[in-house]
Image: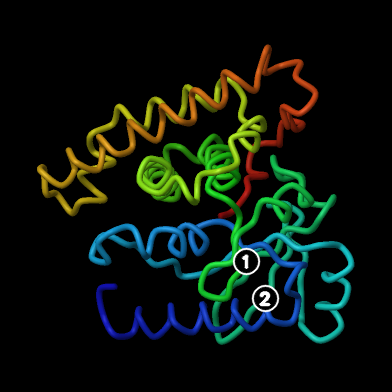
Amino acid sequence: MKNDSSSEAWDQILCDMRGLCEQFPDGIVVIGGAAIWLHTQQAMDKRLLQVSHDADFYMSIQDFGTLRDYEEITPNNRLGKHQMVKHGVDFDIYVEKKNNLAVPYAEAQKDSVVLSGIRCASLEHLLVLKVRAFEDREHSAKGQKDAKDMAKILMLMSDNRAQATQPSSLRFLLREDIQRVKKILADQEVFLDIAQNNAHTAKHLRERARMGFQYVETAYEHGHSSPDDHPGSGRSPRRNKGHEIGF
């Protein structure tokens, strides 16, 4: 965390997410940058962590209806999500069966883990969701953050197998997803950026990510005879240009 204001803002986001998870203990699954930060906080040097300025979560239809009773929520049809504001921070909400994410809500909830009182998507599901977001915005600033987030997920998959225990979840990856992840692994700049331009640290992080990718590739190959016709491949209809997933 770079300064006191960003630290305070991030602490407030975590506090708000923790409060929502207490209200809906089984109905909310945090995704995106907030979930990745929670997964990485114990496994990486805190100087290398990157806080988010917002938060994203997946929610059951039933609990979303309850949330709307006391929070002001607005639809964002262009980006396929709903939004609410708490303490000046945007929270993006993706609703079960409504917002066309690559991972069904029931699967995300089933494989989720609770970290620091916040229910988060598994590393495998976070990788699937991140690579689909990256597909839409690879050449943007958000796409650069997606690339770093995916690199961190791969590092964790090599580092902490206790958190990487759902290889069947990777069945939602497509063949082109694997190629995109491989492209990120080959990009030295991604790891230099994470390592704050320390070449030695970047090399070490990249080696960890390579081991994580071996896990992903092996699980993918075992789970797919053909990714295009596998009944659980998670292929979703192509979104129109601009209808990107925003985490």
> Residue 158's x, y, as percent?
37, 40
* Residue shown at 41% from the left, 27% from the top: 214
Report the front residue among 172 and 164: 164
* Residue shown at 82% from the left, 62% from the top: 60
- Quarter occupied by the C terminus: bottom right
Looking at the rendering, which quadrant does residue 205 occupy?
Answer: top left
Q: Badge 2 is on which residue?
A: 21
Badge 1: residue crowd in 10 Å (few <14, some 14–19, many ≥20): many
Q: Badge 1 is on which residue?
A: 119
- Quarter occupied by the N terminus: bottom left
> Residue 157's x, y, as percent?
43, 42
Q: Is residue 163 left or right of residue 7?
A: right
Report the front residue among 11 and 70: 11
Report the front residue among 171 and 75: 171
* Residue shown at 51% from the left, 25% from the top: 178
Counting residues from the N terminus, which is met first, the one under dot 1 or under dot 2? 2
Q: Amino acid at mark 2?
A: Cys
> Residue 33's x, y, as percent?
48, 59
Q: Is residue 234 above or below residue 65?
A: above
Say whether marks 1 and 2 touch (CB < 8 Å): yes
